Image: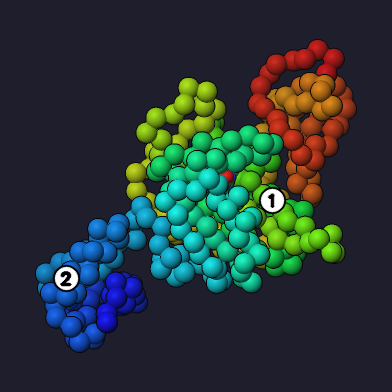
Amino acid sequence: MISKEDVLNYILDSKDAVSGQKIAGEFNVSRGAIWKIINSLNEEGYKIKGKSNFGYYSDPNINIYSKNYLNRYLNQPFHIEIFDTLDSTSTYLKRIADDYNMSTLVCAYQQTNGRGRTGKSFYSPLKGLYFSFAFKAKEIKDTSLVTIKVAVAVIDALQEVLNKKCQIKWVNDIYYQNKKIVGILSEATIDFESKEVDKIIVGIGVNLKFDKIPEELKDVATSLDIDCCNKNLLIATIINNFFKEISIEDTIKTYKENCLLLGKEINFTINNINYHGIAKDINKHGHLIVEANNEVIELRSGEVSLGSINYGNK
Ligand code: BTN
Protein backbone atom coordinates (compact mmCIF):
# COMPACT_ATOMS: atom_id res chain seq x y z
CA MET A 1 0.00 0.00 0.00
CA ILE A 2 1.35 3.39 -0.97
CA SER A 3 1.45 5.90 1.90
CA LYS A 4 1.50 9.69 2.11
CA GLU A 5 5.02 9.35 3.46
CA ASP A 6 6.11 7.48 0.31
CA VAL A 7 4.80 10.19 -1.99
CA LEU A 8 6.20 13.02 0.12
CA ASN A 9 9.61 11.37 0.27
CA TYR A 10 9.59 10.71 -3.44
CA ILE A 11 8.86 14.37 -4.21
CA LEU A 12 11.41 15.63 -1.67
CA ASP A 13 14.07 13.23 -2.95
CA SER A 14 13.57 14.35 -6.56
CA LYS A 15 15.91 17.14 -7.52
CA ASP A 16 13.42 18.57 -10.01
CA ALA A 17 9.64 18.68 -10.18
CA VAL A 18 8.22 15.23 -10.85
CA SER A 19 5.10 14.37 -12.86
CA GLY A 20 2.07 12.61 -11.37
CA GLN A 21 2.49 9.98 -14.06
CA LYS A 22 6.07 9.26 -13.00
CA ILE A 23 5.11 8.93 -9.29
CA ALA A 24 2.14 6.74 -10.24
CA GLY A 25 4.39 4.52 -12.36
CA GLU A 26 6.95 4.24 -9.58
CA PHE A 27 4.36 2.95 -7.08
CA ASN A 28 2.21 1.13 -9.60
CA VAL A 29 -0.96 3.07 -8.80
CA SER A 30 -3.21 5.39 -10.79
CA ARG A 31 -2.52 9.11 -11.24
CA GLY A 32 -5.83 9.71 -9.46
CA ALA A 33 -4.48 7.93 -6.38
CA ILE A 34 -1.40 10.17 -6.39
CA TRP A 35 -3.55 13.26 -6.83
CA LYS A 36 -5.66 12.23 -3.80
CA ILE A 37 -2.57 11.71 -1.63
CA ILE A 38 -1.13 15.07 -2.66
CA ASN A 39 -4.41 16.78 -1.78
CA SER A 40 -4.37 15.12 1.59
CA LEU A 41 -0.73 16.20 2.22
CA ASN A 42 -1.74 19.75 1.33
CA GLU A 43 -4.66 19.58 3.76
CA GLU A 44 -2.13 18.65 6.47
CA GLY A 45 -0.21 21.83 5.72
CA TYR A 46 2.40 20.75 3.20
CA LYS A 47 2.61 22.87 0.09
CA ILE A 48 2.95 20.42 -2.77
CA LYS A 49 2.50 22.53 -5.82
CA GLY A 50 1.86 21.28 -9.31
CA LYS A 51 2.25 22.91 -12.69
CA SER A 52 1.09 21.33 -15.92
CA ASN A 53 4.00 20.14 -18.08
CA PHE A 54 6.24 20.70 -15.10
CA GLY A 55 5.19 18.34 -12.33
CA TYR A 56 4.93 18.40 -8.56
CA TYR A 57 7.38 20.07 -6.20
CA SER A 58 7.26 20.94 -2.54
CA ASP A 59 7.54 24.49 -1.15
CA PRO A 60 9.43 24.19 2.17
CA ASN A 61 7.93 27.40 3.60
CA ILE A 62 5.27 25.64 5.62
CA ASN A 63 3.75 26.40 8.98
CA ILE A 64 3.66 22.81 10.17
CA TYR A 65 6.39 20.95 11.96
CA SER A 66 7.44 18.07 9.75
CA LYS A 67 9.55 15.10 10.89
CA ASN A 68 10.30 14.57 7.26
CA TYR A 69 11.79 18.01 6.68
CA LEU A 70 13.45 18.10 10.13
CA ASN A 71 15.24 14.80 9.51
CA ARG A 72 16.47 16.08 6.17
CA TYR A 73 17.78 19.36 7.55
CA LEU A 74 19.31 18.09 10.81
CA ASN A 75 22.99 17.10 10.67
CA GLN A 76 22.54 14.33 13.23
CA PRO A 77 19.79 11.86 14.13
CA PHE A 78 17.08 12.83 16.62
CA HIS A 79 14.05 11.08 18.01
CA ILE A 80 11.35 13.66 17.13
CA GLU A 81 7.90 14.21 18.65
CA ILE A 82 5.39 16.83 17.54
CA PHE A 83 2.35 18.03 19.52
CA ASP A 84 -0.53 20.42 18.93
CA THR A 85 -0.50 21.53 22.57
CA LEU A 86 1.79 20.72 25.49
CA ASP A 87 2.19 22.18 28.95
CA SER A 88 5.82 22.84 28.05
CA THR A 89 8.14 21.15 25.56
CA SER A 90 10.96 21.29 28.15
CA THR A 91 8.84 19.80 30.94
CA TYR A 92 7.64 17.06 28.62
CA LEU A 93 11.19 16.34 27.47
CA LYS A 94 12.34 16.00 31.06
CA ARG A 95 9.62 13.39 31.55
CA ILE A 96 10.63 11.31 28.52
CA ALA A 97 14.36 12.06 28.15
CA ASP A 98 15.42 8.74 29.65
CA ASP A 99 13.12 6.71 27.40
CA TYR A 100 15.38 7.23 24.40
CA ASN A 101 19.01 6.41 23.99
CA MET A 102 19.50 9.20 21.50
CA SER A 103 19.07 12.95 21.24
CA THR A 104 15.43 13.97 21.34
CA LEU A 105 13.54 16.92 19.85
CA VAL A 106 10.03 17.97 20.89
CA CYS A 107 8.02 20.66 19.09
CA ALA A 108 4.61 22.12 19.96
CA TYR A 109 2.29 24.60 18.26
CA GLN A 110 1.37 26.13 21.61
CA GLN A 111 2.18 25.68 25.30
CA THR A 112 -0.22 26.02 28.20
CA ASN A 113 2.51 26.34 30.82
CA GLY A 114 5.55 27.65 28.97
CA ARG A 115 8.41 28.09 31.42
CA GLY A 116 11.00 30.84 31.47
CA ARG A 117 14.12 31.34 33.57
CA THR A 118 13.92 32.05 37.31
CA GLY A 119 10.44 30.51 37.57
CA LYS A 120 8.84 32.99 35.16
CA SER A 121 6.27 31.89 32.61
CA PHE A 122 6.74 32.16 28.85
CA TYR A 123 3.80 33.38 26.75
CA SER A 124 3.31 30.66 24.13
CA PRO A 125 0.26 31.23 21.90
CA LEU A 126 -0.39 29.61 18.51
CA LYS A 127 1.75 30.92 15.63
CA GLY A 128 4.96 30.89 17.66
CA LEU A 129 7.74 28.33 17.49
CA TYR A 130 8.29 26.25 20.63
CA PHE A 131 10.76 23.41 20.81
CA SER A 132 13.18 21.70 23.18
CA PHE A 133 16.01 19.33 22.46
CA ALA A 134 17.84 17.01 24.84
CA PHE A 135 21.23 15.38 24.42
CA LYS A 136 23.90 13.63 26.48
CA ALA A 137 26.22 16.17 28.12
CA LYS A 138 29.24 14.21 26.88
CA GLU A 139 28.33 15.17 23.31
CA ILE A 140 29.69 18.67 23.82
CA LYS A 141 33.08 19.85 25.03
CA ASP A 142 32.16 22.47 27.60
CA THR A 143 28.80 22.34 29.35
CA SER A 144 29.42 25.63 31.16
CA LEU A 145 29.09 27.55 27.90
CA VAL A 146 25.79 26.03 26.77
CA THR A 147 23.81 29.25 27.35
CA ILE A 148 26.28 31.34 25.38
CA LYS A 149 26.48 28.79 22.56
CA VAL A 150 22.70 28.57 22.22
CA ALA A 151 22.37 32.35 22.01
CA VAL A 152 24.97 32.48 19.23
CA ALA A 153 23.33 29.53 17.42
CA VAL A 154 19.95 31.30 17.52
CA ILE A 155 21.22 34.71 16.42
CA ASP A 156 23.09 33.17 13.48
CA ALA A 157 20.08 31.04 12.45
CA LEU A 158 17.71 34.03 12.55
CA GLN A 159 20.05 35.83 10.16
CA GLU A 160 20.64 32.80 7.91
CA VAL A 161 17.05 31.56 7.63
CA LEU A 162 14.89 34.66 8.17
CA ASN A 163 17.36 37.37 7.26
CA LYS A 164 16.64 39.09 10.59
CA LYS A 165 19.42 40.87 12.41
CA CYS A 166 18.82 40.39 16.12
CA GLN A 167 20.83 41.04 19.26
CA ILE A 168 21.65 39.10 22.39
CA LYS A 169 20.79 40.51 25.79
CA TRP A 170 23.02 38.79 28.32
CA VAL A 171 22.66 36.00 29.19
CA ASN A 172 20.51 34.61 26.47
CA ASP A 173 17.47 36.64 25.57
CA ILE A 174 17.29 37.50 21.89
CA TYR A 175 16.08 40.98 21.02
CA TYR A 176 14.71 42.50 17.84
CA GLN A 177 14.23 46.24 17.61
CA ASN A 178 14.93 46.53 21.33
CA LYS A 179 12.29 44.04 22.46
CA LYS A 180 12.51 40.35 23.27
CA ILE A 181 11.59 37.93 20.51
CA VAL A 182 13.25 34.68 21.67
CA GLY A 183 13.46 33.09 25.10
CA ILE A 184 15.99 30.35 25.85
CA LEU A 185 15.92 27.99 28.82
CA SER A 186 18.90 25.68 29.37
CA GLU A 187 18.53 22.97 32.01
CA ALA A 188 20.47 19.89 33.04
CA THR A 189 19.66 16.56 34.61
CA ILE A 190 22.16 15.09 37.06
CA ASP A 191 23.14 11.43 37.11
CA PHE A 192 22.11 10.11 40.50
CA GLU A 193 25.18 7.93 41.00
CA SER A 194 28.04 9.95 39.51
CA LYS A 195 26.46 13.27 40.55
CA GLU A 196 27.58 14.60 37.18
CA VAL A 197 25.56 16.40 34.52
CA ASP A 198 23.90 13.66 32.51
CA LYS A 199 21.59 15.31 29.99
CA ILE A 200 21.12 18.86 28.84
CA ILE A 201 17.72 20.16 27.82
CA VAL A 202 17.54 23.36 25.79
CA GLY A 203 14.13 24.96 25.28
CA ILE A 204 13.61 27.74 22.76
CA GLY A 205 10.55 29.88 22.08
CA VAL A 206 10.49 32.22 19.08
CA ASN A 207 7.76 34.88 18.83
CA LEU A 208 7.10 34.54 15.12
CA LYS A 209 3.69 36.19 15.22
CA PHE A 210 1.43 37.61 17.93
CA ASP A 211 -2.23 38.11 17.06
CA LYS A 212 -2.49 40.09 20.26
CA ILE A 213 -0.01 40.72 23.01
CA PRO A 214 -0.88 40.80 26.72
CA GLU A 215 -0.77 44.29 28.23
CA GLU A 216 2.04 43.35 30.65
CA LEU A 217 4.31 42.24 27.79
CA LYS A 218 3.72 45.20 25.46
CA ASP A 219 6.78 47.15 26.55
CA VAL A 220 9.19 44.22 26.75
CA ALA A 221 8.32 41.68 24.07
CA THR A 222 7.48 41.74 20.40
CA SER A 223 7.17 39.32 17.50
CA LEU A 224 8.94 39.10 14.17
CA ASP A 225 5.49 39.44 12.55
CA ILE A 226 6.09 36.50 10.23
CA ASP A 227 3.04 34.61 8.95
CA CYS A 228 4.88 31.85 7.21
CA CYS A 229 8.48 30.72 7.05
CA ASN A 230 10.53 27.57 6.83
CA LYS A 231 9.97 26.63 10.50
CA ASN A 232 11.68 23.27 10.12
CA LEU A 233 14.80 24.80 8.62
CA LEU A 234 14.90 27.40 11.40
CA ILE A 235 14.77 24.72 14.12
CA ALA A 236 17.35 22.52 12.38
CA THR A 237 19.71 25.44 11.70
CA ILE A 238 19.61 26.47 15.37
CA ILE A 239 20.42 22.91 16.45
CA ASN A 240 23.08 22.38 13.75
CA ASN A 241 24.72 25.70 14.65
CA PHE A 242 24.73 24.71 18.32
CA PHE A 243 26.57 21.44 17.65
CA LYS A 244 29.13 22.98 15.27
CA GLU A 245 32.64 22.71 16.67
CA ILE A 246 33.50 26.35 17.16
CA SER A 247 36.30 27.49 19.47
CA ILE A 248 35.39 29.26 22.71
CA GLU A 249 37.22 32.36 21.45
CA ASP A 250 35.16 32.50 18.25
CA THR A 251 31.90 31.82 20.08
CA ILE A 252 32.57 34.63 22.55
CA LYS A 253 33.66 36.91 19.70
CA THR A 254 30.35 36.40 17.84
CA TYR A 255 28.45 36.76 21.11
CA LYS A 256 30.14 40.08 21.83
CA GLU A 257 29.62 41.38 18.29
CA ASN A 258 25.89 40.83 18.72
CA CYS A 259 25.57 41.77 22.37
CA LEU A 260 22.99 44.46 23.06
CA LEU A 261 24.48 45.55 26.38
CA LEU A 262 28.15 46.31 25.81
CA GLY A 263 28.97 49.96 26.40
CA LYS A 264 25.49 50.64 27.75
CA GLU A 265 24.15 51.61 31.18
CA ILE A 266 22.55 48.71 32.98
CA ASN A 267 20.83 47.94 36.28
CA PHE A 268 21.10 44.73 38.26
CA THR A 269 20.64 43.41 41.77
CA ILE A 270 23.02 41.42 43.95
CA ASN A 271 21.94 40.21 47.40
CA ASN A 272 18.98 42.58 47.32
CA ILE A 273 21.18 45.59 46.58
CA ASN A 274 20.43 47.49 43.38
CA TYR A 275 23.40 48.45 41.22
CA HIS A 276 23.81 50.76 38.27
CA GLY A 277 26.82 50.53 35.98
CA ILE A 278 28.24 50.18 32.49
CA ALA A 279 28.43 46.78 30.76
CA LYS A 280 32.07 46.53 29.71
CA ASP A 281 32.84 43.06 28.44
CA ILE A 282 32.00 39.38 28.22
CA ASN A 283 34.86 37.21 29.47
CA LYS A 284 35.90 33.75 28.26
CA HIS A 285 33.45 32.11 30.68
CA GLY A 286 30.55 34.10 29.26
CA HIS A 287 30.32 36.24 32.40
CA LEU A 288 29.35 39.89 32.11
CA ILE A 289 31.96 42.39 33.28
CA VAL A 290 30.42 45.57 34.66
CA GLU A 291 31.92 48.76 35.96
CA ALA A 292 29.88 50.17 38.84
CA ASN A 293 31.01 52.61 41.54
CA ASN A 294 34.59 52.46 40.27
CA GLU A 295 34.53 48.74 40.91
CA VAL A 296 34.75 45.95 38.35
CA ILE A 297 32.05 43.37 38.98
CA GLU A 298 31.86 39.96 37.28
CA LEU A 299 28.28 38.78 36.88
CA ARG A 300 28.06 35.01 36.43
CA SER A 301 24.30 34.77 36.16
CA GLY A 302 21.18 36.74 36.89
CA GLU A 303 19.06 39.32 35.16
CA VAL A 304 20.13 42.80 34.08
CA SER A 305 18.06 45.56 32.56
CA LEU A 306 19.08 48.40 30.30
CA GLY A 307 18.59 51.86 31.70
CA SER A 308 20.01 54.95 33.25
CA ILE A 309 18.36 54.76 36.68
CA ASN A 310 21.02 55.67 39.20
CA TYR A 311 20.57 54.04 42.56
CA GLY A 312 22.88 56.49 44.35
CA ASN A 313 25.70 54.66 46.06
CA LYS A 314 24.91 51.33 44.37
C1 BTN B 1 13.04 32.91 29.24
O1 BTN B 1 12.88 33.83 28.44
O2 BTN B 1 13.09 33.12 30.46
C2 BTN B 1 13.17 31.51 28.72
C3 BTN B 1 11.97 31.11 27.92
C4 BTN B 1 12.10 29.74 27.27
C5 BTN B 1 10.86 29.36 26.52
C6 BTN B 1 10.98 28.06 25.81
S1 BTN B 1 9.60 27.75 24.77
C7 BTN B 1 10.09 26.10 24.56
C8 BTN B 1 10.57 25.62 25.90
N1 BTN B 1 9.46 25.20 26.70
C9 BTN B 1 9.32 25.94 27.80
O3 BTN B 1 8.44 25.76 28.66
N2 BTN B 1 10.25 26.88 27.84
C10 BTN B 1 11.12 26.83 26.69
* Circle 1: element type: strand
Q: Amino acid at mark 2?
A: Trp
Residue at coordinates 16% horizontally, 70% vertically from top-left? Answer: 35
Q: Amino acid at mark 1?
A: Glu
Classify 171 as above or below 242: above
What x and y, as percent, mark residue 185? Answer: 63, 46
Quarter of image, res 7: bottom left
Classify 220 as above or below 42: above
**Residue of label 1:** 187
Q: Earlier in the sequence, mark 1 or mark 2?
A: 2
What x and y, as percent, mark residue 74? Answer: 51, 67
Circle number at residue 35: 2
- Left-right relation of 236 to 91: left
The quadrant in which the N terminus is found is bottom left
Tell me if the residue at label 2 has its CB under 8 Å from ligand 1.
no
Residue at coordinates 18% horizontally, 69% vertically from top-left? Answer: 36
Q: Quadrant of ligand 1?
A: top right
* Circle 2: element type: helix
What x and y, as percent, mark residue 251? Answer: 68, 54
- Left-right relation of 154 to 83: right
Spatial distance from mark 1 to mark 2, Cα to Cα? 46 Å
